[in-house]
Image (tube, grey):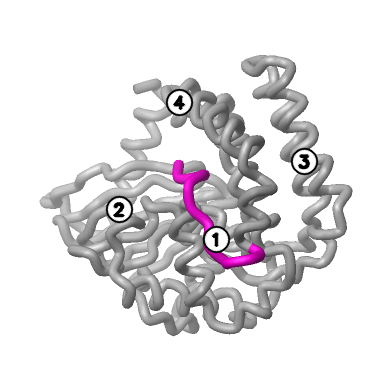
Amino acid sequence: MSKANKNTKIEELNIIKDYYKTNNLKIEYIGEGWHNRIYLINRKDVFRLTATEHGRDKMSIYNKVSPMLKLPINIPRFKTFNIISNNKYKAFAIYTYHKGNCVNFDKLDENSILKLAQSMSIIHNFKYENTFGKYNITVELEQQFENLSKYVFSYLNKNEQLFIEKLYNDYLKSSISQKVKLVFIHGDLNAKNLLQNNNALSCILDWDNIQFNDPMFDFSRFPFKFFNKIIEMYPNKEALNENLIERYLFYRMRKHTYKMYYSSVNPLYADKHLQHIFEFRKVKKDYEKHYMEYINRFEKTKKCDGIFNI
């Protein structure tokens, strides 16, 4: 552990002890992300501390939004939310610890899939004043491609570089992205943020990436087979606009390109960089081989399986 990280952890432990007014605590370090660090207190409370100004702002928004989100699945409900006045990016929230395992999409029961579809629809139709600033998909994707060119391309061969360039350029030049209605989204519905007990979905975690964006961004976190199931159960599919499968495929492929960026610039994920490159190469091969086949199959039968199960 670096001296800076060690000092940060000491500071955070002091914040926790000051809040509970005791040193007699069982404090377990759970993990960290880009914008937060998480501790478990007495196997009862989750104590979440922000590590960036962005994380503090998103936690503040979630604190306002979460009481209004009436979902059929549990979500963290803050018992306490405090902004630390003498630190520009530190805030913390406390909520009840939810037990469970990361979701296995192949083993979720039908009722859980339906509840998740209903929850996503409620989130996507949630009316909240946009305090995130004006979002522009074109600007966002152009910035992402610039980051990939700068930090990732040196690890890839020429063919792989051209593939990514074409992926982004084709999507940006198409009319698809311009037709999308931006809505409130969770932003990170991957398996680690969905808890299940037995085969039932029990909680949706980690709301640090809430934003206004394409709702298909949420669906793109699901493997292909599960996407097919949940899209059929999603209420009012018409509200998702057109080109569902094209948008899903783009965001799914984009996820694998950007995972390489995360692990190349963030020390937290450095040990996974080679794994992310391997996954990108595998999915790229499937994408090139099956893209039109699966678009045609989805349009005819609304069913997809086989690729993008990473």
Q: Which residues are magenta?
A: 299-310
Q: Which mark is residue 168?
A: 3
Residue 201: give x, y in percent of width and height: 30, 68
Q: Which residue appears at 50% of the width and 63% of the height?
A: 228
- The residue to which callout 4 is attached is 275
Residue 310, x across and y down, in percent: 45, 41
Estimate how packed mark 4 is, as few (under 14), some (14 to 19) or many (20 or more) residues with alpha carbons within 10 Å.
some
The amino acid on which the numbered mark 1 sits, given as a three-letter code, is: Phe
Q: In what element is the residue under mark 3?
A: helix
Question: Image quadrant for the N terminus?
Answer: top left
Q: CA distance from mark 4 to mark 1?
A: 23 Å
Residue 269 x/y as whole percent: 46, 30
Residues at circles 3 and 2 in contact by the CB criterion of under 8 Å: no
Q: Residue at x 20, y 61 (%)?
A: 99
Can residue 275 be spotted in the picture? Answer: yes
**Which residue position holds label 2?**
102
The type of residue carrying mark 4 is Gln
Task: Compute the Cα span from label 1 to label 2.
Answer: 17 Å
* Label 1 with label 2: CB-CB less than 8 Å: no
Q: Quadrant of residue 96?
A: bottom left
Q: CA distance from mark 4 to mark 3?
A: 22 Å
